[in-house]
Amino acid sequence: MTVLLEVNDLAIGFDDAASIVDGVSFCVNAGETLALVGESGSGKTLTCRSVLRILPDAAQLRRGSIHFHGANRSADLMSLSEKTMRDIRGDCISMIFQEPMRALSPLHRLGNQVAEVLWLHRNMGRAEAKRRVLEQFEQVGFADPERAWCSYPFEMSGGMRQRAMIAMAMIAKPELLIADEPTTALDVTTQAQVLGLIRSLQKETGMGVILVTHDLGVVANMAQQVVVMNKGRVMESGLAKDVLGAPAHPYTAKLFAAAPMIPQVATPARAPSHDDVILDLRNVSKTYTMRAAGWRKPISIPACQNVDLQVERGKTLAIVGESGSGKTTCARIAMGAETPDLGGEVLFRPAKNADAIPVHTMNSAERTSFQRQAQMVFQDPYSSLSPRMRIQDALTEPMEIHGIGSKSDRRDKAAEMLSWVGLDANMMRRFPHAFSGGQRQRLSIARALTLDPKLLICDEPTSALDVSVQDQILSLLEDIRERANLSYLFISHDLAVVARIADEVAVMRAGVIVEQAAPDTLFYNPQHPYTKALIAAQPEPDIGRPIDLDLVAKGAGSPRLWPEAFRFEGLQAPALRELEPGHKVRCHA
Amino acid sequence: MIFLRYAVWRFITMLLTLAVVSVLVFVIINLPPGDYLSNQIAELRATGQAEGVAKAEFLRHEYSLDQPIWKQYLIWAGAAPGPQGYAGLLQGNFGWSFEFDRPVGEIVGDALWMTVLVNLAAVLFVYLIALPLGVLAAAKSETWVDYTAGFIGYLGLATPNFLLALILFYYGHRYFDLPIGGLMAPELEGEPMSWAKVQSILLHLIVPTFVIGTAGAAAMMQRLRANMLDELDKPYVDTAKAKGLGPARLLAKYPLRMAFNPFVADIGNLLPAMISGSVLVSVVLGLQTIGPALLIALKSQDQFLAAFILMFVALLTLIGTMISDMLLVLLDPRIRYGARG
């Protein structure tokens, strides 16, 4: 086994402050994958970028050495001149970035951006370079390489963009590939396919890979070696099977415990009852019309169709689906923020046996009272709190709007809600920037609670958070649901997160619900190929349970390619059938 | 193909806009009470010169100033028959200047081309100065290069144009033997175009171009610098670095292309700002542009002359906007695909 990259006692810092990364050492072997694992702020990204010396201007490499032992060239990467370093970048060592949306230039065609590497390092003519790029495009899974060559990034889905990114990184056949969270911005089924692609390319070319990730499930599927980082230091490192099998360091164990998992279910759950429904979506469809330029006919785009969902009082209904599946549209319609197409309605029942109020035809008094009783928690805690409002003002504002209580009443209520979400009342004078991501999400939950709502709509409340924080927020949400007798409509793309909190799950794809059941039933006996793909694509932090790519491929493709019984095209979806009590699947009879 | 269709469509909308602008221009000029001739008649009556009054009354009828305003507009535009039949803008008849007692077309004739020339030179100057300085200031941000460029820029913004003009004339003449005032040597005026005349015009253009262009260049430079700084932090710049691209090529190919849009989109806005901004400069420098004529026309309510000049500025602006829109479509695929719908 030859050592490809040796990092020794690396230290990186900014200005005069203490080092952010300190004493990091590891080795990457040729043909192997090393995973750098850690939460945000652990220094894993700085570490991997220092190999190519693509760091922020203010960052200094303070100490240590980075030795690269390539087949044709060996060098101490820290002492090379900038010019020689440029010859190594893209040629011997290449890199894939996290957000394929932003990491590709929107103004240049994919072909141009990928071929540029060859023009730079191989002195290749245009025709020759194009031939190579088309080959590479085919290898990374573009059905029509010619079309990909002249496409712009914004014409492609996230998964396809990341494939183009991989093609760009692989085109010069580098000996080392650095992948910085390459799948974090992707849907779970796409993630599985992209990981599979990286693995098969590695097998073909024998390159070494540094995979930066926060997801132990990804590590288990990809890596031979693991380095666990926290606050710029290495907590634990070693063979993946040892570290994942028996984590020695408490931090690794903590990460492990927090990693969301789909439980192994032995028996199906009982059918959920629907006798006290707080929110009732009936035959809800939404079609957006896109205005076309000039005199052409506008285009209609169906976002969701024929959605029937009931949220039971005191229970959690989760909608799971990938981006573009229509789950957020459903949530917005449930909130009254969008009107459904003709024929659909949403009913809200404030108390058991009370009259149901149609959400979209309320008068203004009813609307005000509905808004008090249905609150929302948003995905991104960084942008959902105004940076210029003190916590106290942010928390009392909803009560002020609804004219509840006196000034001191409102402050007391805000303090009480803060203690509910585990924060201290003396933090009320602070601004949001003084809080971490997890604390901010607690604040937005506290804000939603100040009006004593009955229904909380949570739109991916944990997907912007680290795993250990995600775990805490989910516990908090469970806790509050019991305490305040809340009902949740929970939107997520992550089946494992939902597994824990939901009483009933609706899986959406292409605007329709494809399967609906209690989570245990869903995991015990998934029927729909897409549900099966979602479950199979979930990376488990267990080396013995790798992702079954065939199962993922079968269900994750277009509805046109599903097995006969489930196949449909456009708006011609089959009906949702009840297979057993409380378990519905969209299939032909 | 897409581009051609867009260009045609854009041209049609430009003509429509021009029609709307002509209505606005005409209405605004007619907003103050009275007109050139009724003012004159009142003055003649006051001084007891009856024969002059008859002539003015005749002119008032001749130029349809006794008609309701909507009809005046139609006659002026050439969409309705006046006393001389159809004779308006559409027929190439720009009206009569009462102040100069000559047809408008004759007065503005050469000045039109000189205006276009001076302002085109100024726009070119703005772009040639702002582009390299803006990029350099961003690439070397917060170093002495950036600070010096910024200082010069603010100096350019803060110095009054006419003052700069006078200073430049003085030193230009003293050290470089540059001519003072005018757009060509006086003896060449009215002569047919010749090599000597072209040379003389170019020599005379140096100072006005500099004076009119500095403020625009300074503003544009700061804008480009800010845009570039935003783009330099984007992840696609890291991607390009990771490919092994050198700094100069990287800068030009990626962030500059992205920062270029507002730069291009400004062409249309630049023209009217410069023409109105250069009125004072033209008066001070004695340039034979339409600026001084516009000033006189507006002061004395010489409505056909003023209306024509304003229409001309509007036309230049619309053409500038059209050019920048079409360049944007060529430069940015996102806009191109949006235009396709």
Image (spheres, rainbow, N blue to C red):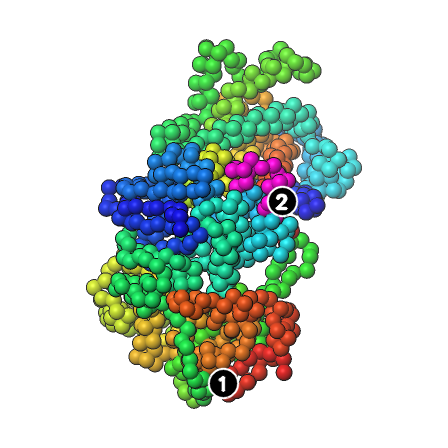
Quarter of the picture containing the C terminus of chain A is bottom right
Does residue A418 appear to the left or right of B180 in the view shown? left
Work out which residue is located at the far right of the displayed protein and give it: B85
Taking depth in this image into account, of A345 and A264 the one nearest to the observer is A264
Q: As shown in the figure, which amino acid type bears the numbered disc 1? A: Gly
Let me know if residue B231 appears in the view: no
At label 2, counting other C-alpha atoms closer than 10 Å, the crowd grade (few under 14, some 14-19, many 20 or more) is few
**Magenta region's main secondary structure?**
helix
| Chain containing the residue with disc 2 | A
At label 1, counting other C-alpha atoms closer than 10 Å, the crowd grade (few under 14, some 14-19, many 20 or more) is some
Q: Secondary structure at mark 1?
A: loop
Taking depth in this image into account, of B137 and A572 the one nearest to the observer is A572
Tell me where residue A349 sits by quadrant.
Answer: bottom left
Numbered circle sitting on residue A131: 2
Q: Secondary structure at mark 2?
A: helix
Tell me where residue B47 sits by quadrant.
Answer: top right
Q: How many marks?
A: 2
Vertical order, A245 against A118 (above or below): below
Q: Is residue A126 magenta?
A: yes
| Chain containing the residue with disc 1 | A
Vertical order, B140 against B174 (above or below): below
Q: Nearer the viewer, mark 2 or mark 1?
A: 2
**Magenta-tinted stretch:** A117-134
Residue at (46%, 37%) from the top-left corner? A87
Mark 1 — residue? A582
